[in-house]
């Protein structure tokens, strides 16, 4: 039997209903400040989708377009103004940033209580202690999709492929918090020729690399849950990192690409905004 699809949209719709109630309980209009430095078609499309989701939830989406030649200190100054602005509840910096700006440095200047991407070292640190109120959206999306499958993570063999700061690393911590047995694979695993061996053991497999067909369908364990985070453009089509047909013939649940992780991330950004507003209160 082919795998059941784990779609992000219905989960996102449920979470949006909860967000609306939370905003009502807060009793004020929330403001999200979004910064884009320079021109980037991909980032602008993402901004559009954030704005649409925010406005549907009654959130005021303030968009700040900055020059592509802005200096690091200029951007820090801009962020600090938003930090000091009592009307602003959350700040997001759109990627990619111009080459002269180091995101790792910049992310430390967003006030932790306004860091709705969950990338400030203080927020990342809270994940380590199992006290995260604001987690990076893509990692949190994977957790929501796993939850929707109904599986209990306790003691499960989970393999995460990809160890970036925004997905693999925070996700491994969130999974450990649920007592999963977590293996994190990356380029080193592949270079050592051990990726297949690890993937074959996964009861839950999460892949966030950005390489078409990296995970062969026949590597997927019978009955596994597969979350494909990868986004790759092939002849004007978006595909993931996992061979979808082969994998869905073996898995019990699988996310479609597009339509799995993607639709959830923007909604979870708004949930983080609500959490930020609660912390500020
Ligand atoms: P990244 O480039 O920061 O990290 C890539 C990771 O893949 C690294 O850990 C690297 O070691 C590993 N890797 C590279 N080649 C490998 C190989 N051959 N075998 C095993 N591991 C390998 O990427 P990222 O920002 O984490 O994004 C990963 C993918 O997820 C991209 O396709 C990105 O577009 C997608 N993504 C999707 C969403 C979404 O909302 N759906 C959000 C964020 C990222």
Image: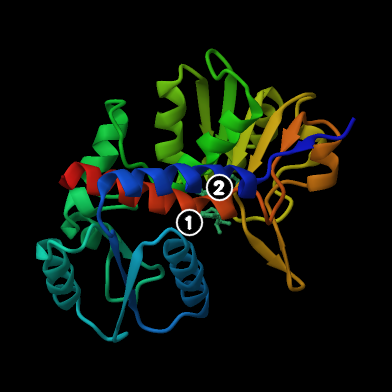
Question: Colour scheme of this structure image?
Answer: rainbow
Element marked by disc 1: helix
Q: Is residue 232 above or below residue 148?
A: below
Could you tell me residue 248's position as x and y percent?
A: 81, 38
**On-image quarter of the N terminus:** top right
Does residue 69 lie above or below 197 as drawn? Answer: below
Position in image of residue 241 (x %, y %):
68, 50
Q: Classify 10 Å Cα crowding around label 2: few (below 14), some (14-19), many (20 and above).
A: many
What element does badge 2 sit on? Answer: helix
Q: Is residue 101 above or below residue 268?
A: below
Q: For the point 17% across and 67% down, which residue is it?
A: 82
Q: Residue placed at 36% from the left, 62% from the top?
A: 59
- 98 with respect to 192 (left or right): left
Label 1 near label 2: C-beta < 8 Å? yes
Of residues 163 and 73, the one nearer the viewer is 73
Q: Position of residue 21 (x, y in %)?
A: 40, 44
Q: Would residue 185 be seen by someone viewing this image from the given angle?
A: no
**Quick check: 29 above or below 10?**
below
**Image quadrant in which you'd find residue 220:** top right
Where is residue 48? Give x, y as percent: 49, 73
> Which of pointers 2 and 1 indicates the residue nearer the eye?
2
Q: Which residue is mark 2?
A: 12
Residue under pointer 1? 266
Q: Which is nearer the eye, 121 or 65?
A: 65
């Amino acid at each position: 039997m082919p795998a059941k699809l784990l779609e992000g949209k219905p989960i996102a719709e449920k979470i949006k209903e909860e967000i609306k109630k939370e905003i009502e309980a807060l009793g004020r209009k929330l403001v999200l400040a979004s910064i884009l430095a320079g021109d980037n078609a991909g980032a602008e499309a993402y901004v559009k989708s954030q704005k649409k989701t925010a406005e549907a939830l009654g959130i005021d989406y303030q968009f700040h377009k900055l020059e592509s030649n802005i200096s690091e200190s200029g951007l820090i100054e801009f962020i600090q103004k938003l930090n000091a602005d009592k009307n602003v509840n959350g700040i997001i910096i759109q990627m990619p940033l111009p080459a002269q700006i180091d995101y790792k440095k910049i992310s430390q200047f967003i006030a932790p209580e306004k860091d709705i991407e969950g990338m400030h070292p203080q927020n990342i640190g809270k994940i380590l202690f199992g006290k995260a109120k604001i987690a990076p959206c893509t990692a949190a999306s994977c957790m929501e999709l796993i939850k929707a499958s109904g599986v209990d993570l306790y003691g499960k063999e989970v393999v995460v492929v990809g160890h970036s700061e925004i997905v693999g690393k925070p996700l491994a911590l969130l999974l450990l918090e649920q007592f999963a047995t977590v293996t994190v694979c990356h380029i080193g695993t592949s270079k050592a020729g051990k990726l297949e061996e690890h993937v074959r053991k996964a009861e839950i497999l999460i892949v966030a690399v950005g390489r078409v067909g990296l995970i062969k369908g026949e590597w997927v364990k019978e009955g596994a849950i597969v979350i494909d985070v990868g986004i790759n453009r092939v002849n004007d089509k978006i595909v993931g990192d996992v061979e979808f047909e082969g994998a869905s013939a073996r898995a019990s649940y699988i996310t479609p690409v597009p339509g799995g992780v993607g639709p959830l991330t923007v909604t979870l950004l708004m949930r983080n905004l609500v959490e930020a507003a609660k912390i500020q209160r």
